[in-house]
């Protein structure tokens, strides 16, 4: 779908290739062609944004985490609480959700990024669990296990109302995803992005180069957390509800599965993974309501066993074979 | 004149085990200095203490007259300390030129740049290319590092270190893993290094040591056994003893 993987390199051509417009064209085609699927479509766009934020730290900087839902959920709850108590203006809500999640990412990053490997993994899990419990117990603020709803978002810029069929919501999500994609892409192609790849590849050498490894990791973790928070805020706004699920370990796990399925460390893996996973989930759940998780599991096993590099890895190899066949 | 690098009474103990004992060492500006010693003499421990990977039990390390004993690796790099690794420590999935550019970008202070594409930092790319050219690697610049033969990867090790423009360069067995027939290439490269860099080479290939170094320090059992010119070292009875095991007790 995208040709060679996007890597932080001093040699890569940063210009957007024609193929990279395909997801956006497809997203707009879906808007017109499948109006009844727009609620699912919005959810997919949100998960793509969330997966993109994970790809930045996992795929590029090599930070292994099972707790990225903490920032997504935090953003979602901040957006909801803000809508209930302060203002239901969506743009302000997204800004506040993103900044708060970024702040949380920065604070927690300062602590946990001193560790690596399994210790880091455990700490990311711990942070999500703590956030989950706080949201569960602070019922006055968060609604606890019942979740928080009963608010109505104001029209965007006072002009575009959120509607029942999620037409506005879909475009709203698409716009934020586009901005995030542009930002992430800029970062990956920058010297900062290249240094993240260096840290992932060989952290000892980066230290020996005098690189401020820890500060770099904290910086990218903060950015990633902010993007996850924006995704969480979008979910709150499009569904006008937030529940404990957004802070759950399940969500972190599902997200990781989606990204691995699509392909890690290549930007568009974060696009392909959620689309395939969530569409498969949707259709399997309709066909085999009791066994749909079996299908998901099977898909993941096949990808991990036969297709390192995810679906995009398979596409790469196919394209390579076709090109070789032609010459 | 202030030595480029100096250690004063440097000691390291692991419990009852002493791996470095009262090492007093001076590396002059522009030196071509070799550190040799039999296996287990404490060479690696010494280098790790110099780089900041291992904290000494006591003693001091000075870089250009500035004490850096308690400083991090990063701060030492800022003071002009660079190194290569005994076992290749490279960025295997990146291109050759990226390997060098990462070092150059850190030195130029542009590696925090988040918005301008890396390739637009022409000064970084050009300098990296130039460095590769001087090492005879220009043709390989755009290849993936993993595609290079081992000998060339050893040269990339050196290229990365040079990208840091160090004042003091520690070369940890630059010819390790290279067939002796090819080690002359490494020697050519070492001979062509800028004269102003003070170089400390840790090496097992005695042929290379004696052709490159003008001064040799012999380490044995964690302590300095002797120091002198290649001629003095090769004719020293104690050195022969530790290397050839002629001692009878």
Image (cartoon, coloured by chain):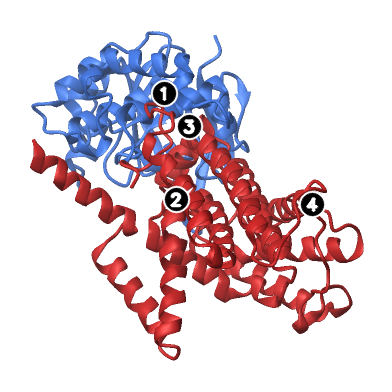
Chain colours: A red, B blue
> For the residues marked 4 and 1, what is the alpha-carbon distance in whole angstroms?
49 Å
Of the two numbered discs 1 and 3 in the rendering, the one whose residue sits closer to the viewer:
3
Name the residue beneath numbered marker 3.
Answer: A209
Same chain for labels 4 and 1? Say yes or no: no
Q: Position of residue A242 (x, y in %)?
A: 73, 71
Q: Secondary structure at mark 4?
A: helix
Q: Are marks 4 and 2 in contact (CB under 8 Å)?
A: no
Q: Residue at x 33, y 59 (%)?
A: A310
Q: Residue at x 75, y 83 (%)?
A: A145
Q: Position of residue A166 (x, y in %)?
A: 65, 62
Q: Secondary structure at mark 3?
A: loop
Of the two numbered discs 2 and 1 in the rendering, the one whose residue sits closer to the viewer:
2
Q: Secondary structure at mark 2?
A: helix
Question: What quarter of the picture does the C terminus of chain A occupy?
Answer: top left
Name the residue beneath numbered marker 4.
Answer: A96
Q: Position of residue A311 (x, y in %)?
A: 32, 58
Name the residue beneath numbered marker 1.
Answer: B169
């Amino acid at each position: 779908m995208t040709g060679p993987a996007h890597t932080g390199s001093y040699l890569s051509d940063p210009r957007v290739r024609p193929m990279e417009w395909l997801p956006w064209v497809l997203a707009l085609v879906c808007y017109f062609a499948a109006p009844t699927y727009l609620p699912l479509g919005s959810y997919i766009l949100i998960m793509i944004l969330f997966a993109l934020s994970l790809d930045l730290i996992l795929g590029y900087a090599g930070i292994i985490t099972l707790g990225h839902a903490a920032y997504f959920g935090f953003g979602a709850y901040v957006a909801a609480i803000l809508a209930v108590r302060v203002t239901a203006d969506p743009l302000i809500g997204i800004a506040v959700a993103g900044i708060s999640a970024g702040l949380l990412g920065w604070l927690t990053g300062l602590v946990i990024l001193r560790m690596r490997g399994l210790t880091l993994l455990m700490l990311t899990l711990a942070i999500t669990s703590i956030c989950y419990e706080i949201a569960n117990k602070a019922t006055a603020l968060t609604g606890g296990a019942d979740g928080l709803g009963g608010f109505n978002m104001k029209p965007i810029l006072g002009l575009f109302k959120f509607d029942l069929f999620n037409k506005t919501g879909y475009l709203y999500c698409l716009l934020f995803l586009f901005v995030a994609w542009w930002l992430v892409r800029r970062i990956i192609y920058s010297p900062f992005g290249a240094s993240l790849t260096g840290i992932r590849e060989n952290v000892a050498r980066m230290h020996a180069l005098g690189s401020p490894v820890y500060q770099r990791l904290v910086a990218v973790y903060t950015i990633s957390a902010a993007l996850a928070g924006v995704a969480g805020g979008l979910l709150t706004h499009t569904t006008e509800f937030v529940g404990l699920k957004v802070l759950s370990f399940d969500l972190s796990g599902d997200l990781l599965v989606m990204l691995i399925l699509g392909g890690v460390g290549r930007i568009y893996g974060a696009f392909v993974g959620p689309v395939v996973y969530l569409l498969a989930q949707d259709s399997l759940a309709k066909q085999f309501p009791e066994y749909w998780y079996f299908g998901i599991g099977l898909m993941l096993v096949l990808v991990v066993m036969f297709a390192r590099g995810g679906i995009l890895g398979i596409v790469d190899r196919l394209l390579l074979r076709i090109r070789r066949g032609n010459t | 004149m202030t030595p480029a690098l100096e250690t004063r009474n440097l000691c390291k103990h692991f419990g009852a085990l002493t791996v470095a004992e009262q090492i007093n060492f001076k590396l002059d500006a522009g030196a071509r200095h070799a550190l040799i010693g039999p296996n287990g003499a404490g060479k690696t421990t010494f280098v790790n203490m110099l780089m900041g990977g291992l904290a000494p039990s006591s003693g001091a390390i000075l870089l250009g007259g500035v004490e850096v004993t308690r400083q991090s690796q990063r701060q030492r790099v800022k003071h002009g300390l660079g190194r290569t690794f005994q076992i290749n420590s490279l960025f295997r999935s990146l291109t050759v030129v990226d390997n060098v550019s990462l070092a150059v970008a850190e030195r130029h202070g542009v590696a925090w740049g988040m918005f301008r594409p890396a390739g637009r930092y022409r000064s970084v790319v050009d300098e990296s290319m130039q460095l590769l050219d001087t090492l005879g690697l220009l043709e390989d610049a755009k290849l993936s590092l993993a595609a290079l033969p081992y000998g060339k990867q050893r040269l990339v090790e050196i290229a990365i270190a040079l990208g840091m423009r160090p004042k003091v360069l520690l070369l940890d067995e630059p010819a390790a893993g290279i067939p002796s027939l090819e080690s002359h290439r490494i020697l050519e490269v070492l001979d062509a290094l800028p004269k102003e860099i003070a170089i400390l080479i840790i090496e097992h290939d005695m042929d290379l040591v004696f052709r490159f170094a003008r001064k040799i320090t012999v380490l044995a059992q964690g302590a300095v056994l002797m120091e002198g010119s290649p001629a003095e070292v090769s004719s020293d009875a104690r050195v022969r003893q530790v290397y050839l095991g002629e001692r009878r007790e």
